Image (cartoon, rainbow, N blue to C red):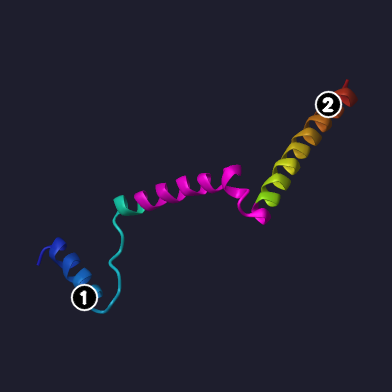
Amino acid sequence: MSHRQKREAKSAHRRSRGEEAPLTKAERDKIIKSAIRQSFIKLDPRHTIKNPVMFVVEVGSAITSFLFVQALSAWARLQRSSSA
């Protein structure tokens, strides 16, 4: 029995027991690409405004990120001025 025949026999056995066959690399890649695409679509403010909780979380994350970058730049300026 060849390797391919063994693999097909295992898949048939799994299906007969109600289990799903393992995904191929192409199928996994397709699922991952779809999931990434959907995650960016769900981050769109036009989509999140329909869910007030997620909208507030998104706005809060944007504000926090802005304040973090601002604090980093202030810290870097402080470090430069104290070393001079």
Percent across and percent down for residue 1 are 9, 67
Circle 1 residue: 13
Residue at image location 31% in from the left, 60% down from the top: 23
Percent across and percent down for residue 26 are 30, 50
Which quadrant of the view contains residue 45?
A: top right
Alpha carbon separation for disc pair 2 and 1: 66 Å
Q: Nearer the viewer, mark 2 or mark 1?
A: 1
Provide the residue span drawn in magenta.
29-54
Which quadrant of the view contains residue 17?
A: bottom left
What predominant SS class does the magenta segment belong to?
Answer: helix
Question: Camera-side residue: 57 or 73?
Answer: 57
Q: Report the quarter where the C terminus lies.
A: top right
Residue farthest toward the front in the current orientation of the protein: 50
Residue at image location 69% in from the left, 51% down from the top: 57
Which quadrant of the view contains residue 13?
A: bottom left
Q: Is residue 22 left or right of residue 37?
A: left
Q: Secondary structure at mark 1?
A: helix
Q: Is residue 54 left or right of residue 37?
A: right
Circle 2 residue: 77
